[in-house]
Amino acid sequence: MSSITFPYAGPGHASSSALASEHGEQHFPSGFDTSADSVFHMNPLSSHPPRTPRTSVMSNTAAEIYVTREEVEEVQETREEDSEDEDQKAHAQASSRVRSEDVLRELLKTSNGRDKAFKLLQYSLRLYLLFHAALAPLRSPARRPWELDLIKRLESTVAGLSLTRKCLILFNWITPLTSIQAQNSADIYVPTGSLKKSARHKVKSKPFLHTFLHAPPPVLLDFVNGISDDIYTFSRLGLIGRRTGARAARFADLCWFASTLVNLVENGVQRGVILGQQHEVESRLYDESMAGTTTKSNPMTSKLDEKELARLQRQDYWIQVTRLKLLMDLLFVSYDVFHIKRAKSQVQTFTGLAAAALSTAKLYDRHKAALVKAVTSS
């Protein structure tokens, strides 16, 4: 059997076996050769070398996995931010490419757009005639012939534009009629029987009168108002008598007044919902700012909240524009419904022009957004 021997350290050096016998620490089994030449003896008084710490493989692997996932999330957030920046840049470029002439062209293609354009022209001319009549006492009483002829032409133009606008909105009651008919359950098939042999039977549609009476009030008001406006327009064209046309005009004003009130109530409810959502987003942004969350620590959440807040603010802006337009319409039609004579021409001129400007701005923004979307997707 091979053995390991240590060199002699000197005369005063005690052997390891002697030291071990002194301490009584011999633990060798019987029959085992314990001679100094064949057995390795360790000095119990010698200092053991420190063990090398073993690095945990699992801890390093977990740390590497954790760092890797964090890096992946950072890369994903960076890519999403880059994509949003690219979308914003593309939207800005598309907005710069869309010209005002293109928006006006698309606006004037529709009958509603032409109606708004004619309404702006009509009430602008009425405002000019109003100021001309107000400043007449300050000028010389003798008017020139060309000036009188110009006033007559402008008054005729205003009346012609009014009739033109009435003709543009002819048969406008078809839109609410289709909405009423869409609620009817005609041509609905319900499968019956087993899965292999399923028979289908046709459900009988409800009567039109039943569907008409159960339609929403705004839709009914639009339907009746459209029919009354058409009767009044036909009377101005000479197809129907003037007395019938005057009654239809009176009924149309009542429907317009009622529908304006209903739309104001709906507008208020809608704005309340938007303000509630806006308050929630603002509260969330405030809580994040108080908790120390910034755009650098949590960029995606902050950007999404800011984007949602901007969208809600823009929507609230146009809701307020619609409410102001409805108020102008309500003031305009109130003079006709309640037969108010005092300052009727002045009030209806200003309110009509303001309503035309507000509705045209809203329609212009809608067509511009559609063009920008089309350019961005192309």
Image (cartoon, rainbow, N blue to C red):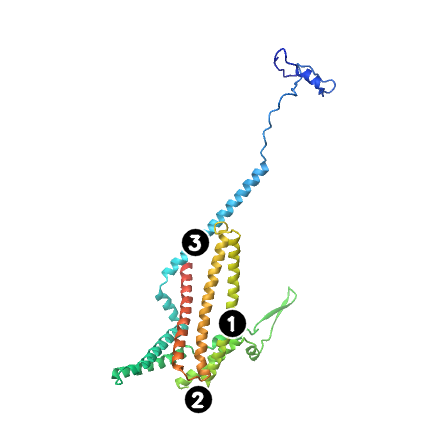
Q: Where's the C terminus, which quadrant? A: bottom left
Judge from the rendering whether residue 200 lies leftward or rightward of residue 278; answer left or right.
right
Label 3's element?
A: helix
**Amino acid type, mark 1:** Glu
Label 1's element?
A: helix
* Position of residue 91 measured from the top left corner of the image (x, y, whole percent): 41, 58
- Identify which residue, 249 or 313, lies in the foreground: 313
Question: Does residue 96 appear anywhere in the picture?
Answer: yes
Dots 2, 3 in contact, CB < 8 A: no
Q: Answer with the quarter of the image where residue 84 lies.
A: bottom left
**Amino acid type, mark 3:** Asp
Labels 3 and 1: the sequence-earlier one: 3
* Position of residue 364 measured from the top left corner of the image (x, y, whole percent): 40, 68
* Position of residue 250 measured from the top left corner of the image (x, y, whole percent): 46, 84
Q: Residues within 10 Å of mark 2 (few under 14, many from 20)?
A: few
Q: Residues within 10 Å of mark 1 (few under 14, many from 20)?
A: some
Residue 347 is tagged as none
**Amino acid type, mark 2:** Arg
Which residue does the image show at 42% across and 54% down from the upper left? Answer: 86
Residue 85 is tagged as 3
Residue farthest to the front, as pictured:
138
Q: How many marks?
A: 3
Label 1 sits on residue: 266
Labels 1 and 2: the sequence-earlier one: 2
Residue 51 in the image: above or below residue 338: above
Q: Residues within 10 Å of mark 3 (few under 14, many from 20)?
A: few
Residue farthest to the top, as pictured:
11
Q: CA distance from mark 1 to mark 2?
A: 35 Å
Label 2 sits on residue: 243
Residue 99 in the image: above or below residue 30: below
Labels 2 and 3: the sequence-earlier one: 3
- Identify which residue, 233 or 334, lies in the foreground: 334
